[in-house]
Image (spheres, rainbow, N blue to C red):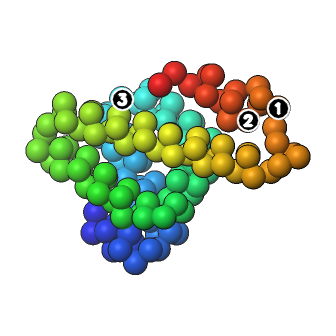
Amino acid sequence: MRRMERNASRGNLAGMKRCNYEFHDLLVSCCGNQKLIEAYLSLVKQVRWATTLSLQLPARLKEAFREHQKIFEAFRRGDGVAARALIEDHSHSSMQRVLSEMEAMEKGRGAEKAKPESGVAATKKTINY
């Protein structure tokens, strides 16, 4: 958490991404469920690009650190209910940020804009949130 805080306060995107990956990997490994860990490791390879997209947004490094710190403190206290709620909020808001950023990027393409049922529009239909 100290390295994450240092990277966030210094605006070190590369360092923050490494800490973010480590945090999430450790969090999942704590469950002790090998099937869940394997599913996570398979999925995370496909979505890590979203971390870069999210963390590069203004003020996001410090905000991400605060969210992770709250999750860590809930785990430290053994408060599973709070940890779950914080993780769900963190995941949902991260997904919303990434989708919003993708929409903005798609709109910026002008004439090359994707068809309505492709890109973000199609992604939103397949994600139940």
Disc with the residue nearer the chain's start (3 vs 1): 3
Dot 3: element: loop
Q: Nearer the viewer, mark 3 or mark 1?
A: 1
Q: Nearer the viewer, mark 1 or mark 2?
A: 1
Residue 79: x and y, percent? Answer: 14, 37
Mark identifier at residue 123: none
Image: 58 above or below 81: below
Residue 67: x and y, percent? Answer: 31, 51
Mark identifier at residue 115: 1
Mark 2 packing: few (<14 Cα in 10 Å), some, or many (20+)? Answer: some
* Residue type at numbered disc 1: Lys
* Residue type at numbered disc 2: Gly
What is the spatial separation of the Cα atoms under label 3 and label 2, in whole angstroms?
33 Å
Dot 2: element: helix
Disc with the residue nearer the chain's start (3 vs 2): 3
Decide: marks 1, 2 in contact (CB < 8 A)?
Answer: yes
Reading the image, the residue beneath label 2 is 119
Horizontal relation, residue 107 to residue 102: left or right: right
* Residue type at numbered disc 3: Asn
Horizontal relation, residue 99 to residue 12: left or right: right
What is the spatial separation of the Cα atoms under label 1 and label 2, in whole angstroms?
8 Å
Dot 1: element: loop
Residue 94: x and y, percent? Answer: 46, 44
